[in-house]
Image (cartoon, rainbow, N blue to C red):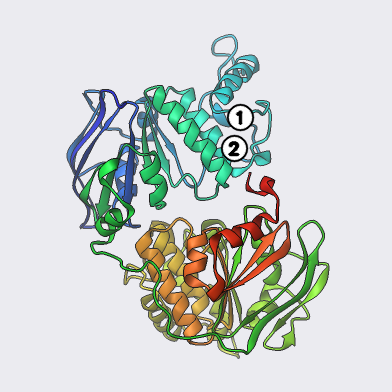
């Protein structure tokens, strides 16, 4: 049961460039409590957490931590006060060991002030911290060797190293397997039992209702509702988040696939990665690719777009084999690829919306003589495609992508490919880490594409999403296709059986 009040936020307000993004937000948090904080991208969740973390200062309002006024001047103040953040993009150095990551902000020294690191103390303390989060690696293990779930547990161990009283989790399960997610939840329960308060931010509302004691909902910078978990439902949370009831999470599609092949894959093989993969995607069709973590879905997408090699097989676009499978040649043939890692591979975070959207199409807007870019025409078409995907700003040239919400960042990735009018669009986890409202908008864009005759290869880890959006679903297991299901025959249990290929170990 939650204990005494540890955090109280009252009347928190914040504006950027004259635009108020937080409007008198307030809530309380108790020791041993898990508070769920949900809302669409841009609702104010990140701003609230950044104020708690000392990154931003509020324009108005008060924060009380353990009965005392709390006004951090920077992230170090937050850490010293016992607040820890487990971000979606983990703050670990892959080339350093676990122990070096845990103590990077302050290594214990030998002989007082002499510049000699006390390796013995670091190793012993790291072992203690790793045992607390069930990580069974030597302290000297490089972080690069850890899975995403294990790295997340290392981040939790890092927070325990400075006796955190409040730990904030921001979309912690986005890249985790089911087993890693269950382990994370078990660790969170253990932290609760120790009296540590947790704030849990997630777009997966089922998980929020499962593990949180209370839920608060933000919309457009306002706290619009919430309360004890027992009084909430997924439908009621969605209604609060978007300001209306969504009758159908997936927009209806009036068009049907054609019989004309757009992408044909024949016997595609890369030893240790995929084996004898073959399928066809038709114009105007959404073909889903299901499978458990490690099934080879993302690896297949990268091979199809020429990012990774293959040893055998054939890729055919519009009836013509792609003789040299490189990203440049694939793009020339009308293919587009939305990577699952939008921040690392899909976007230039320090560049503007316009520069990101224009990048793959610059040659098309260059003069044949000197190669000058026709900026007026390019800017007009970038603006048009940005409006089409409903990016939440009109300053496409001045707004940096890093300042956008996750949903709007994903729209920028989609926009840059729409500018090329793709014939085949490979989508790898297109709605990962974005809220229910932004998901619906992405689904509408997909429906528009297929209505125009684009063939879509749709990779997703969400079964409900595949069933709601796809015309057919193929299933992969350990690099091979183990099942194919038509829309009239969709059944989540049968699809899962194909994904497991008779092996329970695949789920673990």
In the picture, the disc for residue 229 is none
Question: Which image quadrant for residue 345?
Answer: bottom right
- Spot occupied by residue 451 in the image (x, y as percentages of width and height): 47, 85
Q: Is residue 348 visible?
A: no
| Residue at position x 55%, y 17% in the image | 108
Question: Which image quadrant for residue 367?
Answer: bottom right
| Residue at position x 54%, y 81% in the image | 420
* Rendered position, 439 above or below 456: above
Name the quadrant of the N terminus: top left
- Spot occupied by residue 70 in the image (x, y as percentages of width and height): 25, 29
| Residue at position x 61%, y 21% in the image | 127
Q: Nearer the viewer, residue 456 or 152?
A: 456
- Spot occupied by residue 94 in the image (x, y as percentages of width and height): 63, 41
Q: Can residue 492 be seen in this view?
A: yes
The kind of secondary structure element at disc 2 is helix
Q: Which of 239 and 395 is in front in this view?
A: 239
Name the side, left or right, on which 333 lies relative to 455: right
Name the side, left or right, on which 493 lies relative to 449: right
- Spot occupied by residue 115 in the image (x, y as percentages of width and height): 60, 18
The reply to whether the C-beta atoms of the residues labelled 1 and 2 are less than 8 Å apart is yes
* Rendered position, 302 above or below 453: above
Mark 1 / mark 2, whichever is N-terminal = 1
Name the quadrant of the C terminus: top right
The kind of secondary structure element at disc 1 is loop
* Rendered position, 91 above or below 192: below
Instruction: Specify few, some or many for label 1: CA neighbours under 10 Å numbering under 14, 14-19, or 20 or more.
Output: some
* Rendered position, 465 above or below 156: below
Question: Which image quadrant for residue 246?
Answer: bottom left
Mark 1, residue position? 135
Mark 2, residue position? 150
Cα gap from disc 1 to disc 2, whole angstroms: 7 Å
């Amino acid at each position: 049961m939650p204990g005494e009040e540890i955090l109280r936020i009252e009347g928190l307000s914040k504006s950027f460039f004259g635009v108020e993004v937080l409007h008198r937000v307030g809530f309380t948090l108790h020791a041993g409590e898990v508070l769920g904080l949900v809302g669409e991208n841009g609702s104010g969740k990140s701003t609230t957490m950044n104020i708690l973390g000392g990154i931003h200062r509020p324009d108005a309002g008060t924060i009380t931590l353990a009965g005392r006024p709390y006004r951090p001047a920077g992230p170090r103040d937050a850490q010293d006060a016992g607040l820890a953040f487990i971000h979606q993009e983990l703050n670990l150095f892959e080339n350093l060991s676990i122990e070096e990551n845990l103590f990077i902000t302050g290594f214990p020294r030998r002989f007082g002030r002499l510049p000699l690191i006390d390796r013995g103390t670091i190793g012993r303390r790291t072992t203690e911290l790793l045992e607390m989060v069930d990580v069974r690696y030597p302290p000297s293990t490089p972080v690069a060797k850890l899975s995403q779930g294990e790295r997340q547990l290392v981040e939790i161990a890092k927070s325990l190293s400075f006796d955190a009283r409040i730990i904030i989790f921001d979309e912690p399960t986005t890249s985790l397997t089911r087993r890693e997610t269950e382990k994370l939840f078990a660790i969170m329960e253990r932290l609760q039992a120790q009296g540590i308060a947790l704030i849990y931010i997630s777009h997966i509302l089922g998980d929020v209702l499962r593990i949180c004691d209370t839920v608060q909902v933000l919309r457009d910078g306002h706290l619009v509702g919430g309360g004890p978990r027992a009084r909430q439902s997924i439908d009621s949370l969605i209604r609060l988040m978007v300001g209306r009831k969504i009758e159908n999470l997936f927009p209806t599609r009036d068009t049907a696939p054609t019989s004309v092949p757009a992408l044909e894959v024949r016997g595609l093989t890369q030893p240790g990665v995929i084996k004898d993969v073959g399928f066809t995607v038709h114009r105007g069709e959404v073909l889903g690719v299901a499978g458990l973590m490690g099934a080879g879905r993302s690896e297949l997408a990268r091979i199809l777009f020429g990012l990774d090699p293959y040893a055998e097989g054939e890729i055919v676009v519009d009836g013509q084999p792609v003789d040299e499978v490189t990203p440049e040649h694939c793009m020339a043939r009308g293919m587009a690829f939305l990577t699952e890692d939008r921040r690392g591979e899909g976007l230039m975070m320090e560049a503007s919306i316009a520069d990101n959207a224009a990048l793959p199409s610059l040659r098309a807007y260059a003069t044949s003589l000197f190669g000058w870019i026709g900026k007026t025409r390019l800017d007009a078409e970038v603006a048009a495609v940005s409006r089409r995907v409903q990016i939440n700003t009109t300053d496409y040239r001045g707004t940096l992508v890093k300042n956008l919400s996750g949903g709007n960042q994903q729209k920028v990735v989609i926009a840059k490919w729409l500018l090329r009018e793709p014939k085949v669009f490979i989508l790898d986890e297109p709605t990962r880490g974005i809220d229910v409202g932004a998901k619906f908008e992405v689904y509408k864009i997909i429906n528009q594409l297929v209505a125009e005759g684009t063939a879509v290869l749709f990779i997703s880890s969400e079964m409900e999403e595949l069933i709601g959006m796809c015309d057919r679903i193929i299933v992969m297991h350990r690099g091979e296709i183990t099942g194919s299901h038509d829309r009239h025959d969709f059944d989540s249990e049968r699809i899962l059986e194909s994904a497991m290929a008779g092996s329970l170990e695949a789920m673990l």
